[in-house]
Image (cartoon, helix red, strand yellow):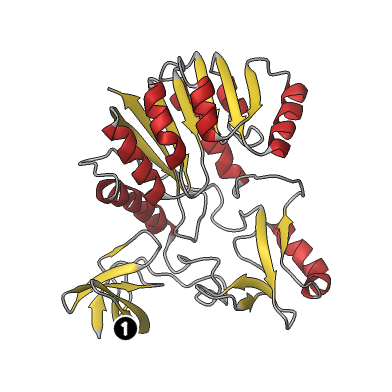
Amino acid sequence: MMVTIDKLVHGGQGMADALGKKVFVPYSAPGDSLEVEVVAEHAGFLDARIVEILNPAPCRVAPRCPVFGECGGCQWQHLDYESQIVWKREIVREVLVRIGKLRDPEVLPTVPSPKRWNYRNRMQLHVDSRGRVGYYRPRSKEVVEFESCAIAADGINEELALRREEISGRDRGIALRAGGGEGFLQVNSEQNENLRGILAQWLGRVPHERVIELHAGSGNFTFAMAAVAGQIVATEIDGRAVEAAREAQGERGTTNVQFRRCDALRAVKRFGQGSDAIVLDPPRKGCPEAIEAIAEAAPASVIYVSCDPATLARDVRRLCQAGYGLELAQPVDMFPQTFHVETVCMLLRR
């Protein structure tokens, strides 16, 4: 079957129209003319794979990694970087319209990553029964082995080279980190600095005397916001992260932050009333359990950081139903060469 790819969609695949259905094709590029084979048929769409690239799109480039397309770590190495950041913005916009039910959301241009390669400061490697070390194949538990990873930090690749024999003898996977350390950290250190700056800047534009932060972790965003906020109550369910945050607070001498161990729902109910702003950075599933409580607390603004546009759009829709309006959405490319995108949204109470 011959198709022409019209666009990229959330999940990273290209989409075309054929046989009266949408056709989704991994590793395709918008503008590609392709011969594809249908691998799965569904009620309203088809899944297909590329058999032959008949006419490549102008944005298509040669992947840097020899196992690209087999390894599940990257999905977009075949796209030039300028196209990657354009399509991440378009995907965020499309999801906010389709799932968030927003008519014309203002989505700013994607903030490009300072590093396009070798940016990952952590990676979770898998080991199979044959001692192969690598990432899983997409939608599979089969390990695809590689010598080095094109998006991993140099320190991780060096450690992998030194410890490969040891790691291959393990009966389970291993997490490698550049510089060591424990607890959650953003995968792209340089871009994380840009994200902190955006949060501090945006918070400075709205009432910010009393700020509640949900899913604060060990204070990654907290200390950047503390430079502009009056008082912050930063809440986190992980006790080890809270202890690490308090230790960092002591080292920094920050006096306008309270770190509390508390889940998001309890945090909003306990501390949310009278807050000027609520800032949240939930896991991929979003924060559905606390959205109603946030609406009831009625802060002047909500700043929502998300690594999943779909769950973000769902939660934004509910906040808009409760009387908020989406002021801005800012995609941030934390994950070059993949379809993943971090997004910051500012919602103001109408």
The residue positioned farthest toward the left in the image shown:
20
Tell me the residue at 63%/76% (across/down).
143
Badge 1: residue crowd in 10 Å (few <14, some 14–19, many ≥20)? some
Along the viewing direction, whichever of 273 and 34 lies nearer the viewer: 273
Location of residue 203 in the rendering, given as x and y in whole percent from the top left corner: 46, 23
Locate residue 5, reporting x and y percent: 27, 71
Q: Quadrant of the C terminus?
A: top left
Looking at the image, which is closer to me, 321 or 157? 321
Position above or below: 314 against 349: below
In percent of width and height, residue 267 lies at 54, 28
Q: Quadrant of residue 148?
A: bottom right
Residue 63 location in percent, x, y?
50, 71
Q: Residue at x 72, y 58 (%)?
A: 176
Task: Tell me if residue 106 can be seen.
Answer: yes
Q: Which residue type carries mark 1?
A: Val
Q: Nearer the viewer, residue 349 or 111?
A: 349
Residue 109 visible here: no
Disc 1 target residue: 36
